[in-house]
Image (cartoon, rainbow, N blue to C red):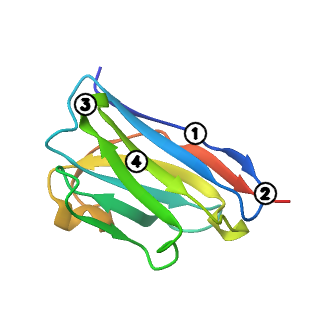
Amino acid sequence: QLQLVESGGGLVQPGGSLRLSCAASGFTLDYHAIGWFRQAPGKEREGVSCISSTGGSTNYADSVKGRFTISRDNAKNTVYLQMNSLKPEDTAVYYCAAGVLFSKCDKGYDMDYWGKGTLVTVSS
């Protein structure tokens, strides 16, 4: 079964940190760009960060620049999103997705696989 599974979400206080993981099963991530997306209640999905297949290129939404870091470990078939200095407005369900083209990743276009998401809640 080809799937992406996110983990690492939870409840954290403002200013805290979480690391999300996106693990693939049934296929290799080696040739895929990977994106993290989020959707807050009542809002549209937004792109958070993307990383190219080699890890050589990354991009970030303005709202998370300097606070979030995306990385990948192809040997573990896993991509990570380190989230620091979390704010209440970061509260959302976070999804990862895999696609062929890094250039289309930030908009979520042509992504072949999507995970089911993990909930991040930032609250005191």
Whichever of callouts 1 and 2 sits on the residue coming sooner in the sequence is 1
Is residue 1 rendered to the left or right of residue 68? left
The percent position of residue 17, horizontal first and vertical second, equals: 64, 54
Crowd band around label 2 with a 10 angstrom C-alpha radius: few (<14), some (14–19), many (20+): some
Mark pair 4, 2: CA separation: 23 Å
Is residue 86 rendered to the left or right of residue 45? right
Q: In this figure, which residue is indicated by the disc labeled 4?
A: 96
Q: In this figure, which residue is indicated by the disc labeled 2?
A: 13
Q: Which residue occupies 52% across, 77% down?
A: 63
Q: Which residue occupies 17% across, 39% down?
A: 30
Q: Name the amino acid, label 1.
A: Gly
Where does the C terminus fall, quadrant-wise?
A: bottom right
The percent position of residue 106, horizontal first and vertical second, equals: 31, 66
Mark pair 3, 2: CA separation: 32 Å
Residue 94 higher or lower than 30, as above or below: below
The circle on residue 75 is: 3
